[in-house]
Amino acid sequence: MCLIVLAWRPGHAQPLLLAANRDEFYERPSQPLAEWPDAPGLFAGRDLQAGGTWLGVGPGGRFAALTNIRAPGQTQGSRSRGELPAAFLTGSHSIEAFLHDLHEQRRHYSGFNLLLGDSQQLWHFNSLAGRARPLAEGLHGLSNADLDTPWPKLQRAKQAIGQALHAPHPDALLALLADPHQAPDEQLPQTGIGLTGERLLSSVFIASATYGTRASSALIINADGSRVLAERSFGSNGSYLGEVVVHC
């Protein structure tokens, strides 16, 4: 994932509303949202190159999502970050225990943000800072920096999800993820990829010939534990490939 915005509302009838875009090279093979045949009860897209996922839900009300951290000069990890959401969703460790173990293992991975939760709690872990913390109630967002870093795309998406709270529905969450607006040059972050790259990646929805938004996901978790997860898939230059909706 390269963009996640969410409304975390403990005690509400819908404690978690989340919208997320996965940005990746189009040539990297992946599978759309589905139940994994080797992990019953796990619903997620799948990276067919490394075997992991970027966002999914699992048994026991579990939820996990991941973004990469874009930081010049960081050490490249030897293991795929996508294995982390899958490991949590298929495991039995509590969130705190999983993150405690991950603190010691994070050096094996390139920089990442990890969200782990259920209808009762939601935690964020930043691998470069080595810090895990429960999220406070409210609107939050992640791109390729730390939690709530005010990049223009993240600010736009957080504002949009705030406006969707009065009538939350997967279609409304997916719609806010389709925003192609690019930020003015003077507002762009400087993450070591050059001006052309920063411009391309400054929009909520990214489209080009080789790299862009591959999947848009909308998740609603209800207080009774039921969940709705929807995913739209895209190909080169933002071409629409299909949609999957799962009730679990």
Image: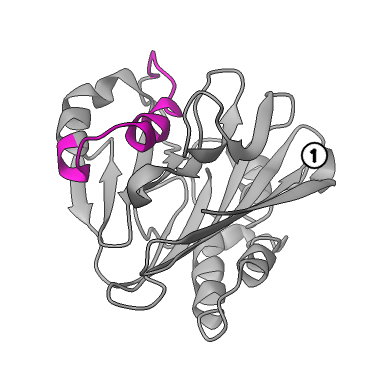
In the displayed orientation, state which residue is furthest to the top: 78
Residue 81 shows up from this direction: yes
Q: Position of residue 194 (x, y in %)?
A: 60, 38
- Residue nearest the viewer, comparing 119 with 29: 119
- The amino acid at mark 1 is Gly
Q: How is the image coloured?
A: one colour
| In this picture, residue 63 sits left or right of residue 105 | right
In the displayed orientation, state which residue is furthest to the bottom: 166
Q: Which residue is mark 1?
A: 235
| In this picture, residue 230 sits left or right of residue 154 | right
| In this picture, residue 244 sits left or right of residue 102 | right
Q: Position of residue 20 (x, y in %)?
A: 55, 54
Q: Residue at x 15, y 37 (%)?
A: 97
Q: Position of residue 245 (x, y in %)?
A: 66, 54
Q: Height in image: 213 above or below 73?
A: below
- Residue nearest the viewer, comparing 207 with 97: 97
Q: Height in image: 102 above or below 64?
A: above
| In this picture, residue 103 sits left or right of residue 189 | left
- Per the rendered image, the range of residues in magenta is 76-97
Q: Residue at x 36, y 47 (%)?
A: 62
Q: Residue at x 26, y 62 (%)?
A: 120
Q: Position of residue 35 (x, y in %)?
A: 57, 37
Q: Height in image: 9 above or below 69?
A: below
